Image: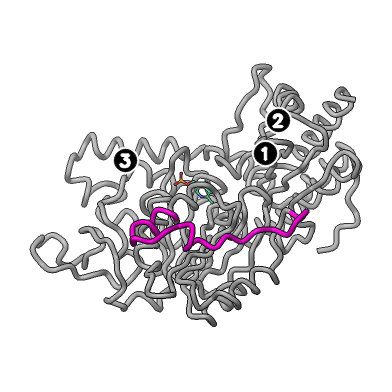
Amino acid sequence: MLETEYQNGLDAARVMDHQDELSHFRNQFHLPIQPNGKPYVYLCGNSLGLQPKTTAAALQQELLDWKNLGVEGHFHAKNPWMPYHEFLTQAMAKVVGAKPEEVVVMNTLTVNLHFMMVSFYQPKGQRNKIVIEADAFPSDKYAAESQIKFHGLNPKECLIELKAREGEVCLRAEDIQEVISKQGDEVALILLGNTNYYTGQYFDIKQITEWGHAKGCFVGFDCAHGAGNMPLNLHNSGCDFAVWCNYKYLNSGPGGMGGAFVHQRHHQNKSLPRFTGWWGHNKDTRFKMRDAFDPIPTTEAWQLSNPPILAMASVWSSLKIFEEAGMDRLRKKAIRLTGYLEFLVKSLGDDIINIITPSDPAQRGSQLSIQVKQADKTLFNKITEDGVIADWREPDVIRVAPVPMYNSYEDVFNFYSILKSALNEKG
Ligand SMILES: *Cc1c(COP(=O)(O)O)cnc(C)c1O
């Protein structure tokens, strides 16, 4: 979409809000309130999404059924706990672009990453390496290193780190391709964050999967910053697995449950290594308790425990709102909203700011990572005092994510004018 018609000014922002067919969703969320009684300009939905107003009642329902029914709630609760996770599957699958049988909400993100690596990191002979971003989220790197050690190998030899070129922050697709084509024969698993948490750069899942598969590697993605942010089309992209959390763009609350995708081509493969538990066992015979493990022929086979219903109720109440809004409409608004943020921030001048996130909307989601030249944390503290919740990364980067679900164009304008006056004061 070409956006040449952006205008600076509060009135222009309000006109865009007025034209926004998703603007009413803001009212379905609790906005954190400043000491002065006004809502914060909340631009941190990439770290922790806001609480839907329906979540408290959803949790209350489960507490009530537990109170009144005890164990009978497994079958007789308003939303019976036995099949509870299945209630989330359709909506979750839509958010990440998968078939319902390919996704499951379970555990938390890093836990799911480990379970997926048990299945998809199978080092054999020379093919024993994992490709990862040099600036991957720390948890992902720790998980990959520990998996390598678990197989008796050395992370120094078995982790291939993708680094940006000298003087650049984002990775170039052609450099990723080159590493895969040169070293692919030694690679057991390619594991990338599909949207980098630091730069906001989006990687083309389909393209990278094709490069990896051509070399016989498994390819998986950490979609923590992608799920609910970008249309991921996991099924069509063909990647082997993906994992994500539901508490960033997907608003399920602090420490909320994660999700996992396993492509259907692996569902019938009984030789794939897997750590198992009773919730992955054939539902018809699960309670006989004595049968040999008989995996459900879907991604549900990777479930271990009976799920935490309270945590799941919270994910579900958010997914219902995503079903209503739809990823296509959210993405359309995100492109315009983030483009507006870019337009305003750029007007502050190249000598003061540098946006490290790619300028091509196809290579980013909602987040912009704004490097402020010669700034330190006092600038960030100032904008926080003035009512902005964003994220600071040392030494000089402010990460902001206007989230199309609940952020307005007015939020974006307010952030810009607060940043501008903080910069003026700094002189
Ligand atoms: C947020 C995030 C995590 C956090 O993992 P948890 O297991 O949910 O604590 C891990 N990896 C990436 C890429 C993230 O963005």
Which quarter of the picture shows residue 15? top right
Q: Residue 388 has which mark?
A: 2
Look at label 1 and name its amino acid.
Leu
N-term-proximal mark, 3 vs 2 = 3
SS at mark 3 in the image: helix
Which of these two is toward me, 387 or 392? 392
Closer to the N terminus: mark 3 or mark 1?
1
How far across and down, in percent of the image, does residue 75 sit?
21, 52
Whole-number angstrom distance, CA of label 3 to CA of label 1: 31 Å
Nearest the eye: 130 or 359: 130
Closer-to-camera residue (7/223)? 223
Q: Seen in the image, is 328 located left or right of residue 411? A: left
Callout 2: SS: strand
Residues at marks 2 and 1 touching, judged by CB atoms closer than 8 Å = yes
Q: Is residue 236 visible?
A: no
How packed mark 3 is, by other alpha carbons closer than 10 Å (few <14, some 14-19, many 20 or more), is many
User: Label 3 CB, ligand 1: below 8 Å?
Assistant: no
Left or right position of 85 against 210 = left
| Residues shaded magenta | 145-168
The residue under label 3 is 62
* Left/right of residue 78 with respect to residue 294 in the rendered view: right
Q: Position of residue 257 (x, y in %)?
A: 41, 47
Residue identifier under label 1: 43
Amino acid bearing label 2: Val
Give the camera-side residue of 146 and 28.
146
State which mark lies toward you, 3 or 2. 2
